[in-house]
Amino acid sequence: MTWSRRFETPIALPDGRVLKTLREAGEYIASLPAKTARQDHWQIATRELLISAEQGGIIMLAEIAMRKAIHHG
């Protein structure tokens, strides 16, 4: 599979940017401060992105995990 897979519905970030692909979502997580990226909700999002991109997993699960992480709390 590939990191260029697209989300069914792009994910809007609070700062106005939009994530359209698994790669963009992965880059977003990689740009987070280490303390933030270690939080459980971001770890789940990271795992689901990896499964979707590298093992052909269900992209909707990655999308849901990203949305939950972004809007956590």
Image (cartoon, helix red, strand yellow):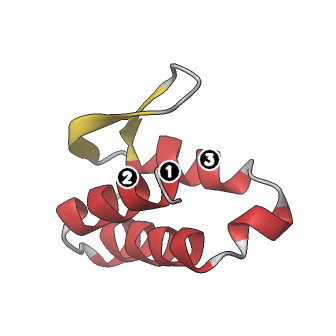
The crowd level at tag 1 (other Cα within 10 Å; few <14, some 14-19, many 20+) is some
The crowd level at tag 3 (other Cα within 10 Å; few <14, some 14-19, many 20+) is few
Inspect this view and state whether residue 60 appears: yes
Name which of mark 1 and mark 3 comes first in the sequence: 3
Q: Are marks 1 and 2 in contact (CB under 8 Å)?
A: yes
Q: Provide the residue designation for mark 1.
A: 70
- Apparent side of residue 36 relative to residue 21 in the rendered image (left or right): right
Q: Do the residues labelled 1 and 3 touch (CB within 8 Å)?
A: no
Q: Provide the residue designation for mark 2.
A: 67
Q: Provide the residue designation for mark 3.
A: 27
**Rendered-image quadrant of the N terminus:** bottom left
Give the tally of numbered discs. Answer: 3
Whether residue 42 is situated above or below residue 15 in the rendered picture? below
Give the label, 1 or 3, closer to the camera: 1
| Residue 48 occupies quadrant | bottom left
- Apparent side of residue 67 relative to residue 47 in the rendered image (left or right): left
Real-space Cα distance between discs 1 and 3?
Answer: 14 Å
As helix, strand or loop, the secondary structure at mark 2 comes to: helix
Disc 3 marks a residue whose amino acid type is Glu
Give the label, 3 or 2, closer to the camera: 2
Disc 1 marks a residue whose amino acid type is Ile
